[in-house]
Amino acid sequence: MAKKNSEHSRPMTRRKFLSNLAAVSTGAVGLPAWAQQKSSKTGTVRVWGEPGPYAGVAVDAMNEWAKKFAPGLAFKLETLSWDSVYVKLMTDLAARNPAHCISVESPIAYQLMADLLLEPLDDVVEKVGRNRLVDGVKWEYWGAWKGKQYVLPAHHQPHLLVVRMDVINELGLGDPDKWDWNDLRNAARTVSEKKKDMAGISLALGRNLCTDYHFAALLHSAGGRMFDPANKYQVVFDSPETVEALEYVKSLQPYMPKGAVSYSFLEVVDSIVTGRAAISFYWGRPYGRAAEENKTVFASLQSFNHARHPKTGRRSNWNDFQGWCIPRPNNQYVAEVKAALAYYQTSPQWLVRYCHSLMPNVSPTYKDVLNDPTLATHPFFQTKKETIMNYYVNSLAHSSSTGNEMLKGVNPLAGVVHGRSILAQTVQKVAVDNWKAADAAKWGARELEQVRKENLRLLGGAA
Amino acid sequence: MNTLGVLRQVVAYLVLLVVTFLICFPLIWALSTSLKAPKDVMATPPQLLPPQPTLENYRNLVTGKQQYFRADQSYVPTTAAPQHFMSWFGNSVVVSLGSTAISILISTLAAYSVTRFRYWGRRIVPYFSLLGYMVPSIILVFPLFLVMTELRLTNSLWSLTFGYVSITLPFCMWLLWAFFRSIPIELEEAAMIDGASRLRVFIDIVLPSAAPGIIAAAIFSLIVSWNDFLFARVFINSIENLPLTVGVMHFFEGTHVDWGLMMAAAVLMTVPMAILFMLMQRHLVAGFGAGAVKG
Amino acid sequence: MPFAVAALVFMVYPVAEAVRLAFYHYNPLNPDGTNFAGLDNFRAIAADPLFWQSFRQAAVWTACSIVLQTAIGVALALLLHLPLRGISIFRGLLLFPYIVPTVVIALILQWMLNADVGVVNWSLRGAGLIDENVYWLASPGLAMLSTIALNVWKYTPFVTICVLARLQTIPLELYDAAKVDGAGTFRRFADITLPQLADVLAVVVIFRTIWTFNKFEEIYLLTRGGPGTSTFNLAIYSFEQSVASLKLGVGAATGVVMMGLLFVGSLVYVRVFRFDEEPSQ
């Protein structure tokens, strides 16, 4: 870091920054022997990724590998919107024609690996470096099953408490980092009451993945879970903690924008960036958009770990632990994909570029990338360093996932749960249909029982 | 009721204008939005006439310009890219024309054969057609998808073409059967006695008389194939092979919704149908009138 | 002759497959694990409250749509029947909504009904009819209304054309005779026009009901069946079962139920149609 400090007395512009990177990456480091194996195969290697520029960066890296070692191959990115992952997965797998490489959130990866649809990647892990992970995470968070690693980390992506500090300070609502659930609700109420045209808090309540993810964080903070991996994956959803989480959402609802019952990812980001909500749960995306569209919002936006649950003290967030996996059936490019992935993941330049492509949405997973001096040259580090560090590092202590609830054990059923939007539907029973939280929890538990019953094969004899 | 009082006429015209406006308003609004610059699209209160009309959205669609999402003063490509728009357009054209051609071919010949020859089962064909027509596509889509999987046709335009034949064929059969039934056989018989072959008779005598029906059926097929969403959604996986209907839904991806671009796509998607409609209007109405009411 | 066979194959085979699928457990992620299910799928849907909710909502949706389409359709037809100059232009514009792809009108409506920047809310506020923005697509009741509106917009012209065609065949002498008898406009309508239209309306209503009950795109593209499940109908239920729950067998079973209802509907149609063939009056 010392070397670079003397170079910026003012924030570096993006163009200069990218040209620096280009200079660095073209002088490629000498490659180890295993990475120099060539392949003579031809064709297109299909890579799936979620919406966002970062998957494109990874594919660019893989194509660089291809140019050098497999000139007949071209890696091509196909983007799946979050809501269409299941449709595409289903149709492609049914057509016995899945992609050759998939970048996917951990719940789906867990489902695929438990269904023995993925290629084990332990050899790639060795090449990438088993000790390279940042502190506070384990390889299995991304996807390990029965002793084998099936998923390589692409990034991790928690959602945090996103706050408009100007509004908070104006209304004297204290330091969001110290809030608990009551403080959060109080803040939301105050904003709604005192500010015209602004809702206190914006959460997703539609029947979609975003709602699942928002609710999961609250559920885990309260101490509740869907399944218990230590006990044959029994459904433990019908619990006082679940009821409490549901009731909390319901109590926040009056302070949400009125359209929240149909909100998904896009609408929540919109509500933050257009200034229609003061608080939200979100990943890093709003910063990029606000920087472009609404500088006032950008200037005052900050992210913190979530509000503490008053009794348990937990500040759980939902972290996607997104990774790369290789489907096994009908995949003729397994070796090539493995080599390309290894190439890209052993190149700090590409990994830094990956993170820079959408700040601070995608967080680095390897120590050397996190500490790489070029990482901090991104202009956002000037004004949003604390926020970035919260996403990159400080969130990990509180990370949780629906596929690995409270990091107490992987459960492969989460993918199916998300496919049917069971958590979102449970929330909607309370938020839209006005059921009692206890009844909704029971309904949700029944649905989860169904999922468990129909997918016993995924639990691999553990059930 | 030959002459109406002037007042009545004025009132009638007014009502007609209002109704027409209401019917056409959605498309007028779409057109208006598509001609606005991005900042005007989201401006409130919304105005009907674009303050600074621009063809930027259309240019982006036609040239397939990549959309960019600016993050901290740099450009990063987003996924809501209009770069595939022209391929979607092409796909829609190919699939619509293809399935219509096949449908018309089969139904014309089948209808002719059913009404002119005698063999077992010819009576049931029209009734099956009617039933087939009433089966909604949602019921057929997954079984057909499985068939396509077996034939390894998924994700290709052929799957859509054959799929659409399945849904358009029933109506074409029904319509053409009714038409052929009403064409008197005597003319053909007379010509055949004079020595003309059946094929000649078919081409010279029967086809011209059946032309209105064939045109109506063709128009119907084109419209159904062009407008379908469900089959394309399920059968096609890769973004370049999509037809327009599913393709434009991809503009919802990513983190922005560019309504100007969407509305421009909506307008461009409707234009071919509108042109077809204007050219063939009379035939369409006649066809429906005959097929649906007379039965 | 072979073409007739081809026609039959294209038309019948998919339907047969659809029915067959209803009797199997099919999971697309694991296609080789298909097994016979007997009536399990049917039992499953009968036990699913969402199925019955979808059914109820489909019935309500269909009833409202049909009533509106018929009322507006007839009114429009009467209007277009008037001997005004240039009326043929208006008649020409009539079928326009039918040819617009559902995707297009759904997108446009989503844009227009957008609660914050949509033109509908702004116009209503401007006219002083509402105070705050209405969430057309986010409130269960209003979402249903919005989808009905789409359906009415798209298919009323269909009704109008059929009615108009029939109107044009009503002999004018009947009206003249009535006028001579001193009957006013309304009486003329009720006693002459309506009965003549009865047979057309019967046909149209039945056809429209059969189709509307099973419509998929009009609802799905606007609300995806939401908010919650308040705008689900059987078609969407079937789709969700196949896609979201990956239970193609159940989706197909729903399809079979839908076909059964269709069949009943068409029997009714045939009855009316036969009745209609006898010489009237």
Image (cartoon, helix red, strand yellow):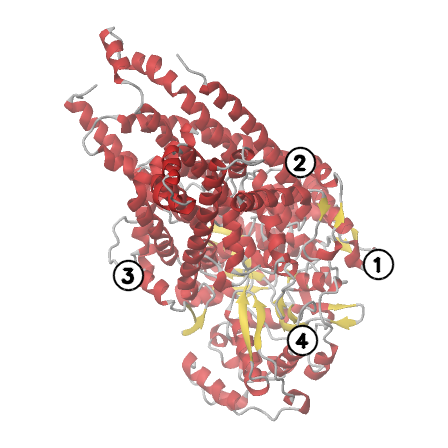
Do pointers 4 and 1 mark residues of a single chain? Answer: yes
Task: Residue at 61% x, 65% y: name it.
Answer: A158
Residue C49's mark?
A: 2
| Mark-to-mark CA distance, 3 and 4 | 46 Å
- Residue A349: horizontal and vertical position, in percent? 55, 84
The answer to which quarter of the image holds residue C53 is top right
Tell me if label 4 and label 2 are in contact, CB under 8 Å: no
Q: Is residue A340 above or below residue B50?
A: below
Residue beneath disc 1: A462
Mark 1: few/some/many CA within 10 Å (<14, 14-19, 20+): few
Do pointers 4 and 2 mark residues of a single chain? Answer: no
Tell me if label 2 and label 1 are in contact, CB under 8 Å: no
| Mark-to-mark CA distance, 4 and 1 | 29 Å
Residue A334's mark?
A: 4
| Mark-to-mark CA distance, 3 and 1 | 61 Å
Name the secondary structure under disc 1: loop
| Horizontal relation, residue C123 to residue C230: left or right | left
Q: Is residue B134 above or below residue A387?
A: above
Residue beneath disc 3: B55
Task: Residue at 56% x, 48% y: name it.
Answer: A206
Residue situated in front as seen by the camera: A158 or B42: B42
